[in-house]
């Protein structure tokens, strides 16, 4: 399964169908993937501001997922 398919399943299953995540988390994985690709492969990389924003979004996303897993346990 590719990154785009994971994103599609996250949106379909966890946001639209089961309502486990808020819609604001929908684009998070692709947002982070695009920033990682820029940092890894583009000469200009990413700015500190963009890196900080990516870290903030990743942390928030992971905290949300962690809470869901703990609720299910």
Image (spheres, helix red, strand yellow):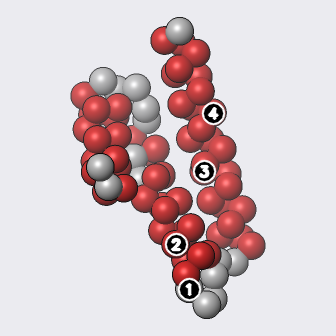
Dot 2: element: helix
Identify residue for label 2.
37
Q: In this view, does 72 lie to the left or right of 14?
A: right
Among numbered discs 4 and 1, the one appearing first in the sequence: 1
Identify residue for label 4.
63
- Residue found farthest to the front: 1
Residue displayed at 67% across by 55% down:
55
Dot 1: element: loop
In three-dimensional space, the C-alpha distance between marks 1 and 3, rounded to whole angstroms, equals 21 Å
Q: How many labels does the image show?
A: 4
Q: Residues at badges 2 and 1 in contact (C-beta under 8 Å)?
A: yes
Residue displayed at 49% across by 62% down:
33
Residue 52 lies, in percent from the top left, at 72, 62
In three-dimensional space, the C-alpha distance between marks 2 and 1, rounded to whole angstroms, equals 7 Å
In three-dimensional space, the C-alpha distance between marks 3 and 4, rounded to whole angstroms, equals 10 Å
Among numbered discs 1 and 3, the one appearing first in the sequence: 1
Q: Is residue 72 left or right of residue 50?
A: left
Residue displayed at 61% across by 49% down:
58
Dot 3: element: helix
Q: Quadrant of residue 67?
A: top right
Dot 4: element: helix
Image height of 48 relative to 73, above or below = below
Q: Residues at badges 4 and 2 in contact (C-beta under 8 Å)?
A: no
Identify residue for label 1.
42
Residue 72 lies, in percent from the top left, at 49, 12
Q: In which quarter of the image is residue 9?
A: top left
Q: Residues at badges 3 and 2 in contact (C-beta under 8 Å)?
A: no
Among numbered discs 3 and 4, the one appearing first in the sequence: 3
Residue 68 lies, in percent from the top left, at 52, 21
Q: In which quarter of the image is residue 41?
A: bottom right
Among numbered discs 2 and 1, the one appearing first in the sequence: 2
């Amino acid at each position: 399964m590719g990154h785009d398919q994971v994103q599609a399943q996250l949106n379909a299953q966890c946001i639209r169908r089961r309502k486990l995540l808020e819609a604001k988390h929908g684009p998070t994985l692709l947002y982070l993937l695009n920033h990682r690709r820029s940092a890894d492969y583009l000469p200009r990389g990413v700015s500190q501001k963009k890196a900080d924003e990516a870290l903030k979004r990743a942390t928030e996303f992971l905290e949300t997922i962690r809470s869901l897993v703990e609720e299910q346990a």
